[in-house]
Amino acid sequence: IHSTYCRAELTMGVTKETLKEGDAKTFPSKGDKLSMHYTGTLASNGKKFDSSYDRNKPFEFVIGRGDVIKGWDEGVMEMSLGEKAMLNITSDYGYGSQGAGGVIPPNADLKFEVELLKIGSVSADGGCCVIS
């Protein structure tokens, strides 16, 4: 039984596939406010359930304090500014047995294409200190 448990543990969590390299030097730290674009799909069938692109507005949140699913809190911390990546997130690092909003079923593995646009006041396009 123990060996089965250990094998299952290895398949849980989040993996990141880089789609476009970032600057490879500016990484988020716990407590940073981030701005990102994303598209979320179900791993089982590719069905899109949410996208910031559809709203034409990046998603903003603070990393590392549980504001987002665990797969984001851990996976996005590995991204550098300007990077676009695919986060493959197992259900335990997503919405678990609860699912979400009637669009994500219980125990669903997820795929998020994410792009890190801004860390604090530093933008991926090289701009700094944008006044809004």
Image: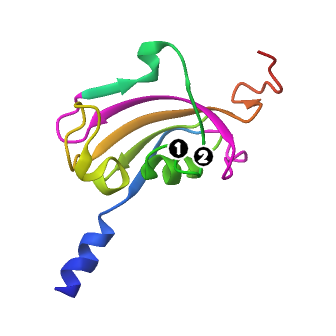
Q: What residue does disc 1 label?
A: 67
Most foreground residue, 104 or 16: 104
Q: Describe the element under mark 2 as helix, strand or loop.
A: loop
Residue 20 in the image, given as x and y percentages of width and height = 53, 35
Position of 14 relative to 48 (above/below): below
Q: Quadrant of residue 4?
A: bottom left
Q: What residue does disc 2 label?
A: 63
Position of 55 relative to 1 (above/below): above
Amino acid type of disc 2? Answer: Ile
Left or right: residue 92 versus residue 14 is left
Q: Quadrant of residue 129?
A: top right
The 10 Å Cα crowd at callout 1, few under 14, some 14 to 19, many 20 or more, is few
Most foreground residue, 86 or 109: 109
At x 39%, y 37%, the residue is: 112
Callout count: 2
Which numbered disc covers residue 53? none
The reply to whether the C-beta atoms of the residues labelled 1 and 2 are less than 8 Å apart is yes
The C terminus lies in which quarter of the figure? top right
Amino acid type of disc 1? Answer: Asp
Query: Magenta stretch: residue 25 in it?
Result: yes
- Which residues, given as a range, are shown in magenta? 22-47
At x 28%, y 79%, the residue is: 6
